[in-house]
Amino acid sequence: MTESAQVSVDERIKQESFLAKLMKRPELGAIAGAILVCIFFLITADPAMFTLSGVMNFMTPAAQLGILAIGAALLMIGGEFDLSIGSMVAFSGLFFGVCVVTWQLPLVLSIPMTFAFAAAVGAINGNIVIRSGLPSFIVTLAFLFILRGLSLVGLKMATGGSTQLRGVRDQVENDWLAPVFSGEAFGGLFAWLAELGVVETFKNGAPKVPGIPVEILWFIAITLAATYVLLRTPAGNWIFASGGDKVAASNSGVPVNRVKISLFMLTACCAALVAIITVMDAGSTDARRGFQKEFEAIIAAVIGGCLLTGGYGSAIGAFFGSIIFGMVVIGLTYTDFDQDWFQVFLGAMLLIAVLFNNAIRKRVTGER
Amino acid sequence: MEPILKGRNLVKRYGRVTALDHCDFDLMPGEILAVIGDNGAGKSTLIKAVSGAVAPDEGEIWLEGRKVDFHSPIDAREAGIETVYQTLAMSPALSITDNMFMGREIRRKGPLGSVFRMLDRPAMEKFARDKLNELGLMTIQNINQAVETLSGGQRQGVAVARAAAFGSKVIILDEPTAALGVKESRRVLDLIQDVKSRGIPIILISHNMPHVFEVADRIHVHRLGKRLCVIDPKDYTMSDAVAFMTGAKEPPEQDRAA
């Protein structure tokens, strides 16, 4: 104990200012960005955006993207990419739809089967990348098309020619597991709050916000779990090490291949979770589901401070990156701007984030 | 005296190239053995064979008189052989502590560690600090500093400290000063002496003759996949050693390896 006391007052190390320490956190950029975007919409948007129902409104797409982005962020920290997660959403959505509608399986079977299926596809992705030594960019780009195409073909086979599979809602309506993956949680609490007048109500007395959409809870839970794993467990160190310097990591005894393949499986499972939630919400599955989500998820992860080269980043950053995304997508509808500015905004955010992260990294490691 | 690490008749072929040609190897307890040789002489294959990175096609390796059969560097590490690689084998974004414990993290006691797999950072930090202190490396004070913020010499220092902390029997240093400047090399050489004084034998692979002649007790000269001779640096000059390893000069009969 005395030793650590000595160490903490050692005069040989320069005291770092709080600001300098803060600057080194990967999530700083995303948090700063989220605040800026918030201020922007506070000024330009209709005040309804920041009421409880407005917040739920933009948090829902943020959460759906965020679940993907957390997986993508972990994979990027581990030094790999997955461009197939968007198509994976459609593909696992198809599998889930077939389980529920065509095979009439209860959710307690359909959901684990969908996860297992997604994990298997993720494992194929990962194994090809690891065994061939090719960049994951190119391998998963191939799967972007393969999985999207399979979703289309599979849907037509399952439905006899349509690219939509309907009837999921009728099948799952009375399933005991449905509330975990669809609808809103804490309905009772919100009804009670509405009675107290804390939550706004419609004229008939029903609360305007019936509860917290489940995807938001999943999103928060996954962010917390990922942060815990990254910062507090050996597995987290292994992920950073695998992405930072693969050879060094395996020399140190880190099972790099296993870490990377597990991350591919995890990312695919995140896509499957989004698929299950959105399919149950919409009551149908569609081959276009998750279109371009892979890019949006990677953008959210990069805004959140993940380096494209791996070995650096954070789940909290991806969390805020996704919220920025949700705010921009939905926020523009509360303003007078044309909604199509959204893409411009997203691209600009990405560019700024990368430039910003780059500058910060140079300062942190710089000086030599 | 029985060698602590002994290789006999080691053969390793890569396709049609014979990298190790019935090569012998001996490391005595408590010594610094330098391994020198021209590029392509097979010295890194030799080192990889004793550190478990490659499995020799033929031949046997004994550690402390017991025959060992390594399939990976992890096997060798578990047997007490630690290797410091030429490329600074660190994970840049992680702290010094996390790097020292990479691949053998300490977890919390009780369910926090076994179920939630939580790292015991305080214990790891204390251990890391103690080890760096022992080796006089405490100019690195903040062990939570990311490794990428350290200089090359400091990183190599951490790598050597890691090897010294966990390598109970043999430490292998592969070109530890190759990427370093003069001052930084000096620190690493001092560190090597420090480790030796703690009784751990060291294998040093290096191209830098002044460094080799400064710290080595014996020099293993490798040529054409074989141990050509083992010389005492006090009996020969650096140019003799270079002449042996390039084949310009025949080694004297009494030093010739069988």
Image: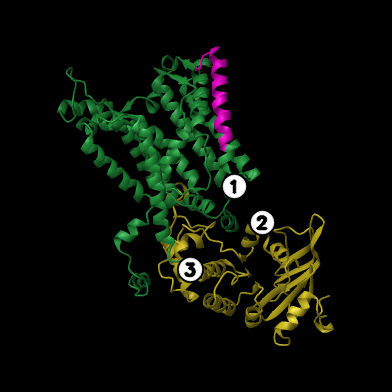
Chain colours: A green, B yellow
Residue A203 percent across, percent down from the top left: 16, 18
Residue A234 percent across, percent down from the top left: 49, 52
Neighbourhood count class around disc 1 (C-alpha, 10 Å): few under 14, some 14–19, many 20 upward: some
Alpha carbon of mark 2 to alpha carbon of mark 1: how far?
14 Å
Residue type at mark 1?
Asn
Residue B211 position (above or below residue A47): below
Q: Are marks 1 and 3 in contact (CB under 8 Å)?
A: no
Q: Residue furthest top?
A: A160
Chain under callout 3:
B
Q: Nearer the viewer, mark 2 or mark 1?
A: 1
Q: Which residue is mark 1?
A: A257
In percent of the image, x 30 and y 64: which residue is there? A17
The kind of secondary structure element at disc 3 is loop
Q: Which residue is mark 3?
A: B151
State the mark number for residue A74.
Answer: none
Q: Nearer the viewer, mark 1 or mark 3?
A: 3
Residue A359, quarter of the rendered image: bottom left
Quarter occupied by the N terminus of chain A: bottom left
In percent of the image, x 55 and y 45: which residue is there? A260
Residue A147 is at least partly visible in this image: yes
Alpha carbon of mark 2 to alpha carbon of mark 3: how far?
30 Å
Q: Secondary structure of the magenta portion, mostly?
A: helix
Chain under callout 1:
A
Residue A301 percent across, percent down from the top left: 42, 43
In percent of the image, x 53 and y 38: which residue is there? A265
Magenta residues, as a range? A140-163
